[in-house]
Amino acid sequence: MSNERTASGPIHNRRALLAGGTAAALFAPGLTFAASGDLAAIRKAAETGYDASVKRIQAWIALPSIAAENRDMDKGCDYMMALARDAGFQHVEKVPTDGHPGVFATLDVGAKRTIGIYFMYDVKQYDPAEWSSPPLEARIVDKPDFGKVIVGRGAVNQKGPEASFLAGLHAIRAAGRKPPVNIVLVCEGEEEIGSPNFRQIVTKPNVLAALKKCEGVVIPAGWQSPSNGGVSVNLGAKGIAELELVASGAKWGRGPKTDIHSSEKARVDSPAWRLIQALQTLVTPDGNTPAIDGYFEKVRPLTAREKELLALAAKQLNEADAKKALGVDHWIDDLPWDKTLERLASQPTVNIEGLVSGYTGPGGKTVLPGRAVAKIDLRLVPNQTMEDSVAKLRDHLDKRGFKDVEVNVSGGYDPTETDENSRLIKAEIATYKRLGAAVTVYPRLAGSWPGAVFTSAPVSLPAGQFGLGHGSGAHAPNEYYVIESSNPKVEGLVGATMSYVDFLYEIAAIK
């Protein structure tokens, strides 16, 4: 057993503060509740419930719902509903969509304030051959410099953090308390394919009415830096459009309609080369800047405040840690650290996720493919929209004679922006600081999540990420989530659980 479950880590620094009673209560609104003894009792319950919390994560990982493969989606939805009921939500409802169903649940304790929580129950695909242990077994292993971790698909994205939030509700109930806020839970099973139907869930009349009562919406996260325990509070996130570009002999009217012998290349056109030629027009020769006609027309430059935040972030964040985590030695154009952060927050992108054509198995197979596919994602910044960006891509290809190249959109959503002075953001910052975690306020998460559904009309709420704890490997082999931390800078499962409890109390009291 590591120290995390008993007395180490930033979250425990609070205990010295609580000893100050009334003086401590003046430190931050949430401490008014903490000083009452509630949080000490809830932490004890979280420690007692540790084994059950671990098993909850493992059992969830063992049931993979993979939207891209249409795998176990109804089972995943039903399991999500069972988890919500088990955590104390009184109303739990399956919400059908044009695709896979979502879940809407409410926990009403008669509190003055309400918080919205977003869950996804789907995960990315995986290849077991690439993993050190089977991705659905959720094995507990010792990871050097981290402690005990659960390894499995969905461990950090997002089942570990989401289960840690649910563990907080279990601990509150086990301690004989009730949550300090009402909770509205909205879940989907299509996040990993771009949330194509999530708006249908959120705009369902009873769901929308419940969300309208919320202070904001958060998605649980486990992103503490292993070097200093720091966390980022993001004031937005990039949007995304996920799509395929397809070149085929059937659509082009040239080249083969099916794979043929490669010797025929001497006299037959190649759809694969045609796709490559189309792709080359989308970016500058170095591949680093979008060249789609009009792509930058709506891009909003960084504001003075965003530049100020990025300059502070460059001093607070560690460049060496970032390169190590990404496995890279150089940035684009060998840019200095501060400029990479500016680019990460401000630049839209055109990225090739994968290229598929012809034979890709062992050895060679001399074919001329009749079809070639590029999986593409477009990352979007304010004031771009998914609809406009996809339309610009289509027009760009058409103008260059690539009308036959199909643009098949699978999902996506617009960028998000949240007011730095909203109660939601102020509560996140106050909670982190009270728990001893260094905070970096960052203008925009470079990744994407369907927060735009919450920040845009008709919901129009602040939205972001919150949570202590650590995990990594999302979308990659050997994804993990720390449950017993050997790193005093990073919280394990109990500490992560208590960070959500603390946050709920902060939301209840912050001015």
Image (cartoon, helix red, strand yellow):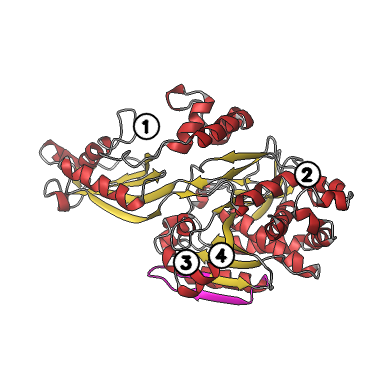
In the picture of the structure, the residue carrying the numbered disc 1 is: 288
- Residue situated in front as seen by the camera: 127 or 83: 83
In the structure shown, which secondary structural element does the residue marked by tag 2 occupy?
loop
In the structure shown, which secondary structural element does the residue marked by tag 3 occupy?
helix
User: Mark 2 belongs to which amino acid?
Assistant: Gly
Q: Look at the image and give the residue range highlighted in magenta.
A: 87-103
Q: Is residue 284 visible?
A: yes
Whole-angstrom CA distance, mark 1 to mark 2, is 40 Å
Dot 1: within a 10 Å radius of its alpha carbon, few (fewer than 14), some, or many (20 or more) residues? few
User: Mark 1 belongs to which amino acid?
Assistant: Asn
Horizontal and vertical percent position of residue 396: 22, 42
Q: Residue 275 vs residue 115: left or right?
A: left
In the picture of the structure, the residue carrying the numbered disc 2 is: 9
Mark 2 vs mark 4: give the one in front.
2
Quadrant the C terminus occupies: bottom right
In the structure shown, which secondary structural element does the residue marked by tag 4 occupy?
loop
Whole-angstrom CA distance, mark 3 to mark 2, is 37 Å
In the picture of the structure, the residue carrying the numbered disc 4 is: 63
In the picture of the structure, the residue carrying the numbered disc 3 is: 202
Disc marking residue 101: none
Residue 343 sits in quarter: top left
Residue 463 sits in quarter: bottom right
User: Mark 4 belongs to which amino acid?
Assistant: Leu
